[in-house]
Amino acid sequence: MFARIRRTLKQFFNKSRKINNEPLNQVSLIVIVLIDIFILINVFTGLDDISRWHLSPAQAYPCYFEWQNYQKQATKDKDYEFIRLPLSNNINNLPSYKEIYQQTEVDHLGKVSPTCLQYAIYKDQINNAKNQQAIKAIDQKQIQISKLQQANSQIRAQYDSTLLEKIAGQPRGQSINQVGAEKAKQNLDQNNRNISQLGKEISLLKNELLNKPESLTFLAFIRKDNEFRTLEESYNQASFWYPSIQLGFQSLFLLPLIFVTLLVHQFSQRREYGLISLISWHLLIIFFIPLILKIFEFLQFGVIFQFIFDAISAIFGRLIFLISYIYILLIPLIGFGVIKFFQKIVLNPKLQAVSRVQESRCVNCAKKIRQNDAYCPHCGYYQYIECQNCHNLTYKHLAHCKHCGSLQDSSNL
């Protein structure tokens, strides 16, 4: 087995750095490596682009997270903060929320949720000039309150100091503070009255904003639990299938490249076009690398992972670390199955030998040889095996002897 692995690896490296069994010079090898790097970068770029061809769950359901945040909030100003969100953007410089949502559909597969489009319409109704002015007025008053509170902090610091000086009987002229205790107390009281008045004005403006028809309509819409619970189910379902959709599109991008390159490689080997065979071999490796990586990424985050996660959560509670055990067992089994598939079907020497013998090619490397050559002049592989019945030499890997037609022992093929 180890000898076979070593032979396979040797063949792999020979095919990667030799043209017609002649090693590449250093300049040619550097050029090949640079081509490989350039193509690999473009392959991953193409994979990234095509993986975003279908709308992601966040793009298809853009209002989901805002609704979810609203549900989780328990603050006193919950409704005001929610109404304030659409008013954070300048209506003169940006497209409407509905247009922003619909723009994600351009040149993409999938549609934005109708619920979210209706949600965007209500946001656009709120985001008008009068409500923008109300928000600015609230913000300005809030800034004034902050300044007054900061001034009060400074006054309190000085007040405590001047109060101690007064208790100690220190003359006012020798005080290090600019304001006396009585004056500081007056300033504090005045600032507190102003803060209280500004707070009432802010509260009044907030209530006016919340009681506007467009605000009441928007709040009534976001409180429709049945509609948004349906939206949540659709979002979760989309999140469940999205990795599978991405892998499907990425495979759609890679498989034609692999198929065409494989045909070119086989054609160039038959015609003994050494340089084309070498380049196509490198391209095959380059196209297989991202495909394997994306398959492992899918296994880690796709439907299979979610199924295992849900099963373990249902059976063992939150013992999620058991997923690692499952993968430690699952991945080698999948790898074993892939190896068996390629060994028995795709790269089966017995299946390949049939066409190679018919075309007078080496049963091992598929290079052209003369009909009576016992050893391949390209790879040195011995072409024949002794028949168990007539003891004449017959081709390796073929089921019947070419002299007597007897069935050969499969273990010796």
Image (tube, rainbow, N blue to C red):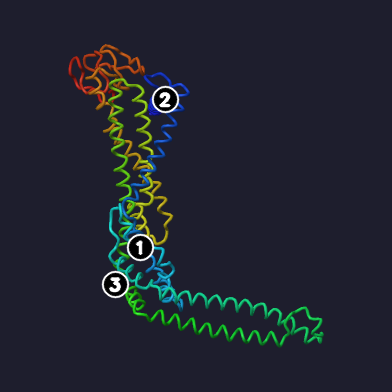
At x 30%, y 64%, the residue is 233
Which one is nearer the viewer's eye here, 332 or 284?
A: 284
Quarter of the figure that contains the C terminus? top left
Quarter of the figure that contains the N terminus? top left
Query: Residue flagged by tag 1: what amino acid is it?
Result: Pro
Could you give the CA–CA distance between mark 2 and mark 3, rounded to whole angstroms?
64 Å
Task: State the SS at label 2.
Answer: helix
**Circles 2 and 3: CB atoms closer than 8 Å:** no
Q: Is residue 381 above or below residue 116?
A: above
> Mark 1: few, some, or many residues within 10 Å (few <14, many ≥20)?
many
Q: Nearer the viewer, mark 2 or mark 1?
A: 1
Q: Which residue is mark 3?
A: 226
Dividing the picture into quadrants, the one containing residue 266 is: top left
> Mark 3: few, some, or many residues within 10 Å (few <14, many ≥20)?
few
Q: Is residue 243 above or below residue 192?
A: above
The answer to whether residue 239 shows anywhere in this view is no
Query: Residue flagged by tag 3: what amino acid is it?
Result: Asn
Could you give the CA–CA distance between mark 2 and mark 1, rounded to whole angstroms?
51 Å
Query: Residue flagged by tag 2: what amino acid is it?
Result: Arg
Is 139 situated left or right of 285 in this image?
Answer: right
- Ranked by sequence position, the earlier of labels 2 and 3 is 2
Question: Residue 343: where, in percent of width, then height?
Answer: 30, 32
Q: Is residue 264 above or below residue 254?
A: above
Task: State the SS at label 1.
Answer: loop
At x 37%, y 40%, the residue is 43
Q: Which residue is mark 1?
A: 62
Dividing the picture into quadrants, the one containing residue 13 is: top left
Q: Which residue is mark 2?
A: 17
